[in-house]
Image (cartoon, grey):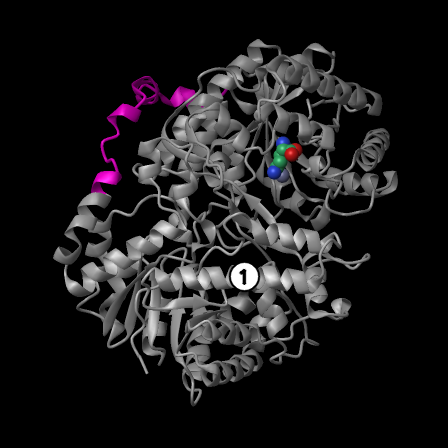
């Protein structure tokens, strides 16, 4: 039996190079294919993935990286954590019911996976949850691969992270029971032929309590003590393991995976690794740039003296990057050269593995070629005008007049009464609008006709809002496919891929833009749409921009300069856009920052730096607005505990947040923390129910106890574009009526 781990990746994309899985699952949902056909597609994707990984020369091929929907959901099913409301016919239907709900049975909650843009389903652990080995997906996939002649290393979500991701009454207290299930699984995996098993514990790159670190220690004492077990690789990623590293080093596991890209701080903590194998995650699993092989090798080499054996790995699972650069024929040669998607990263790992174990000389040519293709000379991509403008900024560029004075001026300018009504920006997008956009993009609809149709839609939406009686109108965003992609397409410095899809959740995939050079705005972006909307009506129209942090969060961003510097370039472009909007007659501008919280570093120690540049970028983008212009921001979530001060520091005149689902709990915290306008969402756009006037009036009355009516706004949560128009209209009419009642009362 081979007891070395070998080089490897922690995980691999699973949606299929052409999103085959998405298509098959959606056809299954629509009843167009049966479960046999769906399983056949899935098996084909697994086979192709294993063959590709085995052919890439990895020392160890990860298994169980496939999922129909989400690996956290798979784990819940495997350990029997299925809430009673889902008990149903077949396993596949139970899985999809948990993911999407079924006949009035609500789905599991979905939330972001750590600081990534991947979303997982939150397991529910209650006192009634009885852990048992209820599913054997990892064993079945191991056997399936063995039949193809490939011995995989099953990848499991670690038991402690699983419980930390779950909700319920103190899930972590159920650890011991859960460990018995994992122990049983390890025995079965070993019996089925697994030599190594990987357990992922990314929860430990965030700050953890002593009790949680104890749980980690207990878990791996128990699992490593299982007689007849495979070898265990425990991986932490998306940051440094910090105090969890000595805990794992003291445990009897065989190997530890470190993220030496996001968590290079761990390099200074490796003295105690003893004879353990370390998987040095030096190839970035989250970003798309070609690896600096020289630097990566040097990092891995640092570990040589402190561990039993060092192997080359990816920093995290490759789930967050697209499959293959080779198919991106539309990119310029230089940009394409610089990129490494999943397939290219396999090759980088193989080269680094040879360099580490057989000497750099054996791969000198590969190193030289890779260095050349990184095209380190970027002078051709510098935008000296942008850089000069940024160098010349002073503190006044980040500051507007005093908030009290702004509020007075805006009252005169906008003439809004107490509790004004508005929406968050988008209106329902019809199939017709999507088809027009696609036709225009494909060149089948000429510019003039496209413009005419979009204007017609904007006019329709403006009139509709007037009839509903909203105070502050929006143009409805019909021209936008996606709030980040739209801006990326209109700014210099970004490139778009054709096939660069990554999974966001379930069958939803996104194609993040690639920010590769200095950013600038060749011409106004939104002015012709928002300006047109304002020209139609006497009521104020709120223009919609996506903020700098969100644009970076949902793109693949150059890593040759600090993020804060890149954020400032984006902010400068938005600042110019704000000015142009004002000149076109817009008196309100909203800058959406739904991702502000998502990028928050997992450890508190890193947060101050991040928040400093994030706030700085927002203030640069909005700081040029006249004091008479009302600046709004929108944040897409409702748990603000640790970032209230940061939100206050953005300095927006009005902040709208998601609140309906959390029953307005957010209002107390933000009402006290932000001295200016606040719009807690009073219509949960994700719920199938249309709220009544009484429902909304109740929420607004509760909010008015915390926030004075002069500061309070009435608006729905975001995402109207995902709903059908009749329900949106009904909900907004009720919202307008409710605001009138509360004002009067
Ligand atoms: N303006 C956007 C909308 O209403 C905001 C979306 C978001 O917050 N994610 O759709
Ligand atoms: Zn939102």
Q: Pinpoint residue 562: horizontal percent, then vertical percent.
A: 33, 38
316 vs 642, left or right, is left
Q: Which residues are magenta?
A: 371-400
Quadrant in which residue 90 is drawn: bottom right
Q: Quadrant of ligand 1?
A: top right
Q: In this picture, is 96 found above or below 188?
A: above
Seen at 24% across and 77% down, the residue is: 275
State yes or no: residue 374 in magenta: yes
The image shows residue 696, relative to residue 414, as above or below, that is below
Q: Is 669 placed left or right of 2 in the picture?
A: right
Q: Nearer the viewer, residue 455 or 414?
A: 455
Residue 464 in the image: state x and y as whole percent.
Answer: 80, 22
Packing grade of label 1 (10 A; few <14, some 14-19, many >=20) is few
**Residue that mark 1 sits on:** 44
Nearest the eye: 658 or 605: 658
**Residue at left 38%, top 44%?**
288
Q: Please, what secondary structure does the residue beneath circle 1 have?
A: helix
Residue 253: in magenta span: no
In this view of the protein, can residue 262 be seen by the observer? no
* Residue for point 71% across, 36% down: 720
């Amino acid at each position: 039996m081979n007891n070395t781990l070998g080089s490897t990746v922690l995980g691999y994309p699973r949606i299929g190079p052409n999103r085959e899985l998405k298509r098959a699952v959606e056809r299954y949902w629509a009843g167009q294919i049966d479960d046999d056909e769906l399983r056949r597609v899935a098996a084909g994707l697994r086979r192709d993935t294993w063959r590709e990984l085995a052919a890439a020369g990895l020392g160890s091929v990860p298994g169980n990286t496939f999922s129909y929907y989400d690996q956290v959901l798979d784990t819940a099913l495997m350990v029997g954590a299925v809430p009673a409301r889902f008990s149903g016919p077949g396993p596949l239907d139970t899985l999809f019911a948990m993911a999407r709900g079924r006949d009035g049975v609500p789905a599991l909650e979905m939330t972001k996976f750590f600081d990534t843009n991947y979303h997982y389903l939150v397991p529910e652990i209650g006192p009634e949850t009885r852990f048992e080995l209820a599913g054997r997906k990892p064993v079945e996939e191991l056997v399936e691969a063995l039949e193809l002649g490939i011995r995989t290393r099953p990848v499991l979500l670690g038991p402690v992270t699983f419980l930390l991701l779950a909700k319920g009454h103190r899930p972590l207290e159920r650890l011991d029971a859960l460990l018995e299930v994992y122990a049983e699984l390890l025995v079965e995996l070993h019996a089925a032929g697994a030599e190594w098993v990987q357990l992922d514990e990314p929860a430990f790159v965030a700050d953890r309590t002593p009790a949680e670190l104890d749980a980690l220690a207990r878990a791996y004492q128990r699992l490593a003590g299982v007689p007849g077990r495979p070898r265990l690789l425990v991986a932490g990623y998306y940051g440094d393991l910090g105090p969890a590293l000595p805990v794992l080093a003291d445990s009897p596991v065989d190997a530890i995976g470190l993220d030496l890209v996001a968590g290079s701080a761990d390099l200074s903590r490796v003295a105690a690794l003893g004879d353990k194998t370390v998987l040095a995650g030096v190839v970035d699993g989250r970003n798309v740039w070609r690896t600096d092989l020289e630097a990566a090798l040097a990092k891995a080499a640092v570990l040589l003296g402190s561990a039993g054996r060092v192997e080359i790995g990816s920093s995290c699972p490759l789930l967050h990057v697209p499959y293959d650069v080779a198919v991106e024929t539309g990119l310029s040669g230089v940009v394409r050269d610089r990129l490494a998607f999943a397939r290219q990263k396999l090759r980088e790992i193989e080269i680094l593995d040879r360099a580490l174990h057989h000497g750099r000389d054996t791969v000198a040519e590969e190193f030289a070629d890779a260095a050349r293709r990184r095209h380190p000379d970027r002078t051709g991509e510098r935008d000296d005008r942008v850089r000069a403008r940024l160098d010349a900024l002073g503190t006044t560029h980040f500051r507007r007049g005093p908030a009290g004075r702004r509020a007075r001026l805006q009252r005169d300018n906008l003439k809004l009464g107490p509790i004004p009504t508005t929406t968050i920006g988008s209106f329902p997008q019809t199939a017709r609008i999507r088809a027009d956009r696609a036709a225009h993009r494909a060149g089948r609809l000429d510019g003039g006709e496209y413009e005419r149709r979009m204007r017609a839609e904007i006019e329709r939406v403006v009139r509709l809002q007037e009839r509903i009686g909203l105070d502050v109108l929006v143009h409805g965003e019909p021209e936008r496919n996606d709030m980040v992609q739209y801006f990326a397409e209109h700014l210099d410095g970004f490139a778009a891929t054709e096939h660069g899809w990554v999974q966001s959740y379930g069958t939803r995939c996104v194609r993040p833009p690639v920010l590769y050079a200095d950013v600038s705005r060749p011409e106004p972006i939104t002015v012709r749409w928002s300006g047109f909307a304002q020209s139609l009506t006497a009521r104020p129209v709120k223009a919609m921009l996506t903020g700098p942090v969100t644009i970076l969060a949902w793109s693949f961003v150059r890593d040759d300069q600090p993020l804060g510097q890149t954020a400032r370039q984006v902010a400068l472009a938005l600042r110019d856009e704000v000015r142009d909007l004002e000149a076109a007659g817009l008196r309100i501008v909203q800058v959406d920052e739904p991702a502000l919280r998502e990028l928050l570093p997992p450890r508190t120690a890193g947060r101050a730096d991040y928040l400093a540049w994030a706030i700085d970028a927002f203030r640069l983008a909005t700081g040029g607005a006249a004091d008479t212009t009302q600046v709004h921001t929108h944040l897409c979530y409702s748990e603000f505990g640790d970032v209230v001060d940061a939100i206050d520091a953005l300095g927006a005149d009005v902040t709208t947040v998601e609140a309906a689902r959390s029953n307005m709990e957010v209002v107390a915290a933000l009402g006290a923390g932000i001295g200016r306008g606040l719009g807690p969402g009073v219509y949960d756009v994700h719920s199938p129910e249309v709220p009544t006037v009484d429902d909304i009036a109740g929420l607004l009355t509760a909010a008015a106890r915390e926030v004075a009516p002069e500061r309070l706004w009435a608006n729905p949560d975001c995402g109207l574009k995902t709903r059908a128009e009749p329900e949106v209209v009904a909900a907004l009419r009720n919202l307008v009526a409710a605001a009138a009642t509360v004002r009067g009362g």
